[in-house]
Each structure stands twice: as C-alpha cells, then as structure tokens.
Amino acid sequence: PIPYDPEKAVEILNDEGWKDSNNNGTRDKNIDGKLVELEIDYLASQSPLGQKVGLLFQDAAKAAGIKVNMVIKEGRNLNQAVRMHEFEASASATALSLAPYDPYQRWHSDNAVIQKGNVFGYINAKNDNLIELIRSTENEDERMRAYAEFQELMYEEQPVIFLYSPTQKFVLNKKFKELFSEKRPGYF
C-alpha cells in the first residue's frame, strides 16, 4: 500500500515552491506575477457520507497548508457537474456486477471528454491498449493477465484514490459448490 505520509506531502509542496508567504495558513505561490493560494474545490453530494469524506479531506489538507472549499450540490446538479468535469476533487461510489468487468467506459481515453463516462479525464495509451485487449481477446488467461496489468497501472498512476471496498458475508448451503471470481475476491 502507498503509505499515508503528510511529511512527504509537505516536502513535495515545499520543493515545488508552495509556501505560506503571507502567513494566512494557506500555501501560495507566485505564478505569472500573481500570488495564487493553494485551494481545491471539493464537490460533495448532500449525503452525509460524501460530506464526511470531504471533512476528513479538508482537515488533512489543512495540515499541509492547502485550503479545501466544500461545494455541496444535490442529485441532478451534482451529476451534471461531474459529467461536465466541473470539479477538482469529489467522492463517489461505484458498484460492479459479477459479470466480467469492461473498463472501457470509465477508463478509456475515448471517454475522457465532457459528457462521457471517464469523468476523471484519465488518459494513458498503455491503459487503452490493455482495455482493448480485455474487450477483444477470447483467451481467458490473456484476459486475466491484461486485467492484472490494468490494475497494476491503476495502482501506479493513481488517477483516483480508492478509499475502501466494503466486505460482505455470504451464507451458502453445502449442497452448492462455490465458484469464486478472480475479479472480485470473495464473490462467487
């Protein structure tokens, strides 16, 4: 796992020239002759969970000298802002079916434009090639290797921060044979 390292974050910000020159608690930097405060708009839904994640993010960022402004939007307005890429940070949830996962809509460069599924704007040619292989190969071993490489690339690039994956318990009668999925360990 990538360690939580606030000291390293502060070191990187310092190395990049972000200091608190006006002593207001927020880092700033002179960019093109203008003093720019290091602020991030965090887009949150009206749900308590999204706002709680935002408050945790806000507190952690403040400790590093970054100001996080929480922007709360309701359902349709929130979805529209996300689809239009009108956010700098946001918490969201996703659910996957047990069918083989097709990462094309969410992660392919073709969909990194406004109103498409890759709302993160993530663009990576190697990732695109892996997704195309996942979608086209009929060889199960080749597909599983491509999924593994895709996951590795997601880990290395960190286009989003995956906070957690909930666990669930299943009760299964002994008369059934369980078949577990490589894609989602713990699911059959």
Image (cartoon, grey):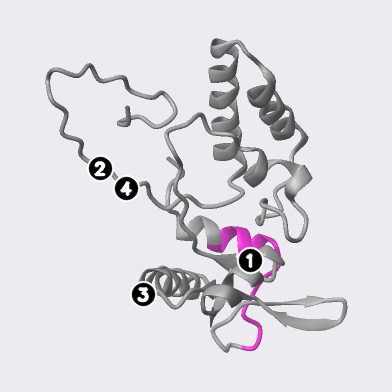
Q: Residue at x 63, y 24 (%)?
A: 134
In three-dimensional space, the C-alpha distance between marks 3 and 2, rounded to whole angstroms, equals 22 Å
Relative to residue 157, is residue 25 depicted above or below?
A: below
Q: Residue at x 47, y 52 (%)?
A: 94
Amino acid residing under circle 4 = Pro
Relative to residue 96, is residue 22 depicted above or below?
A: below
Residue numbers of the magenta segment: 10-22
Please give the label number shown on residue 82: 1
Residue occupied by mark 2: 168
Do the residues bearing badges 3 and 2 touch, measured as CB atoms within 8 Å?
no
Q: Residue at x 77, y 35 (%)?
A: 125
Spot occupied by residue 152 in the image (x, y as percentages of width and height) = 56, 31
In three-dimensional space, the C-alpha distance between marks 4 and 3, rounded to whole angstroms, equals 17 Å
Residue occupied by mark 3: 48
Is residue 42 among what the camera can see?
no
Residue occupied by mark 4: 166
